[in-house]
Image (cartoon, helix red, strand yellow):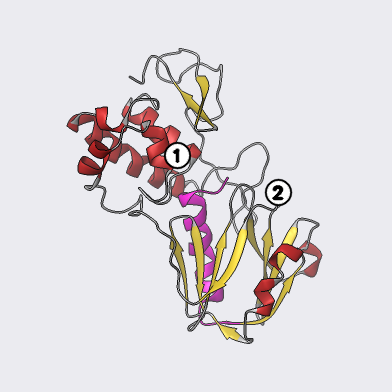
Amino acid sequence: MPELPEVENTVRILRPKVVGKEIVEVEALDPKLGHVPQNLTLPARVLELLRKGKYIIFDLGERKLVLHLRMSGHLFWTHSLSEISKHTRLILRFSEGTLLFIDPRRLGTAEVVEEFSEPLGPDALGDLSFLDEALLKSRAPIKLWLLDQRNIAGLGNIYASEALFLAGIDPRRPASSLTKGEVAKLKDAIHRVLREALDAMGTTLEDKAYRTPEGESGDYEPQVYGREGLPCLRCGTPIERIELGGRGTYFCPRCQR
């Protein structure tokens, strides 16, 4: 379930490997991605590798290759064709190595566009001062507000849950109900959780879906996400799991108000 920390680390690791290099061959092993090689003119030099929210953008000049890893995707850099697995959906070959888009659940996307135009909100790692006014305008549960990429880009189920726990805010509360003090705590919590996860190279859950491009697991250990029934690490109360907007949401009923 790659979110901002996993995608950012992926980009940071791949940037020195691909920027300034040419994609010399593209192969779609999944028919759903067959349009990618059809819409690229090769060789294509990678001018820059960027992250926008949870999107990975290969800037090829007149065109951009935009990837979204979704639930189970990751990118893997290799020099051996033996690394190609049954879950490999797209292959980008460079003269110096090969990049594999591996995605067991086949939910990830790859598009060739002239300009990236997804309607994303401000980046979750950036200036969050806009939250003071933005949250006042919505009665949506704060957890769902944070998950809407049009509001704030990069947060997903894991780190929204973690940030709300750190800030001591019940995920069910209307966004507009937060006090100025609580909004300040939430802003600090979002940045703290994301930076800790970045330093830990992200989160690898039990399904082992996420790996860095070098094959390493993330070492971030969630305090509430995925810990239903286990004692809260602060107060010992069992962590609860509820459904919000069809998404599993984890929280401590005592610490989060």
* Predominant SS of the magenta segment: helix
Which residue is pictured at 25% across the width and 27% down the height?
177
Position of residue 196 in the picture relative to residue 70 (left or right): left
Query: Which amino acid, by three-letter code, is at mark 1?
Result: Tyr
What percent of the width, then of the height, locates residue 9? 49, 57
Sequence-first tag of 1 and 2:
2
What percent of the width, then of the height, locates residue 159? 45, 39
Pick the front one: 116 or 84: 116
> Crowding at label 2, few (<14), some or many (≥20) Cα neighbours within 10 Å?
few
Identify the disc placed on residue 141.
none
Position of residue 86 in the picture relative to residue 170 (left or right): right
Quarter in which the N terminus is drawn:
top right
Q: Which residues are magenta?
A: 1-22
Position of residue 66 in the picture relative to residue 149 (left or right): right
Q: Secondary structure at mark 1?
A: helix
Quarter in which the C terminus is drawn:
top left
Mark 1 vs mark 2: give the one in front.
2
Q: Which residue is mark 1?
A: 159
Pick the front one: 250 or 39: 39
Is 11 magenta? The answer is: yes
Q: Secondary structure at mark 2?
A: loop
Q: Among all residues in the image, which is located at the extreme left?
A: 180
Separation of residues labelled 1 and 2 (CA atoms):
21 Å
Q: Which residue is mark 2?
A: 105
